[in-house]
Amino acid sequence: MRIPLIAALVSGACISAFSATAALAQEADASDNVYERDHLTIGVGALYGPSYEGSDDETFSPIPVVQGRYKGIEVNPRTRGLAFNLIPSTRGSKIDFSAGPVFGVSFNRNRRIKDDVVRAAGKLDAAIEVGGTAGVTVNRLLNPYDSLTVSADVKWDVNGAYGGMVWQPQVTYMTPVSKAMVVAVNARAHHADGDYARYYYSVTPEQSAASGLPVYEAKSGWDTVGLGALVGYDLSGDLRDGGFALFGALNYSAMLKDGKNTPYTSLRGSSDQWTVGAGIAYTF
């Protein structure tokens, strides 16, 4: 049986464990498992992490959770966005594929900038990102219910903020550890094109004059790598019956190259980025 696409919750890294719990259906009829039929998960969580990419100031941010399936089309959460899988599930398959559109919004250096110097350099526009996602999942690696997913998101800013392209490959391993609990770990990297790098990492002469930061010219490249983990726990004691579930997540990202060397990070922030999150969701 297909394990639905594991989607990002924390900084594009941690996952919605609730969509992955369908793997437990192998020990029950499909009619006994809410994830084996059309369903919807809605929830809310809170993140505590850097106020912008490269910041050493932390802020709280609310984040919604939306996941579901309708007539074979899956909807999966992304951080401040959604991804769709248009490839129908295949019950009992060893290998599954996923592909579809992905949408998101980036508020990087758009709000909640605590650092006075960075704020003086100017608030940036929010980016609306549209693109595609694709992946392959191998089921039942170490036990009858686990999975390993290799996927990638490619997105373009269509709002005229950075106006470029980013892509993020990632690998996620998920396994239930009981009927009530599922655990997932994730590794990923983020590649920024020149437009993205110049918009977020460069310091223009005007920004330098306003903030006192040195002029800096950024180029394209891999700007972050990271690791994330998430634990989901069903409050009824059985992941398959839906209802309320809790989740907690921990995410670490390391800024690389111009993401690390930009004065916004090297002089005013930190290349080590930690994010924690928690929340509650309901599936029906």
Image: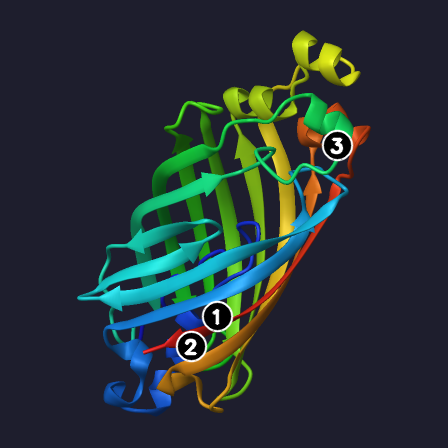
Q: Farthest residue in the top direction?
A: 205
Q: Nearer the viewer, residue 60 or 93?
A: 60
Query: In this view of the protein, can residue 216 be seen by the observer?
Result: no
Residue at 28% from the left image edge and 78% from the top image edge:
36
- Per the image, label 3 sits on a secondary structure element best described as helix
Disc 1 vs disc 3: Cβ atoms closer than 8 Å? no
Residue linked to disc 1:
17
- Residue with the mark numbered 2: 21
| Residue at x 49% of width, y 91% of height | 237
Q: Amino acid at mark 3?
A: Thr
Q: Is residue 14 visible?
A: yes
Marks 2 and 3 close (CB-CB < 8 Å) = no
Which residue is identified by label 3?
A: 265
Q: Is residue 224 left or right of residue 151?
A: right
Amino acid type assigned to the residue bearing label 2 in the image = Thr
Q: Is residue 269 left or right of residue 171?
A: right
- Please tell me which of labels 1 and 3 falls first in the chain: 1
Please tell me whether residue 15 is drawn above or below residue 130 in the rendered image.
below
Residue 187 lies left or right of residue 162; in this view the side is right
Q: Nearer the viewer, residue 118 or 10?
A: 118
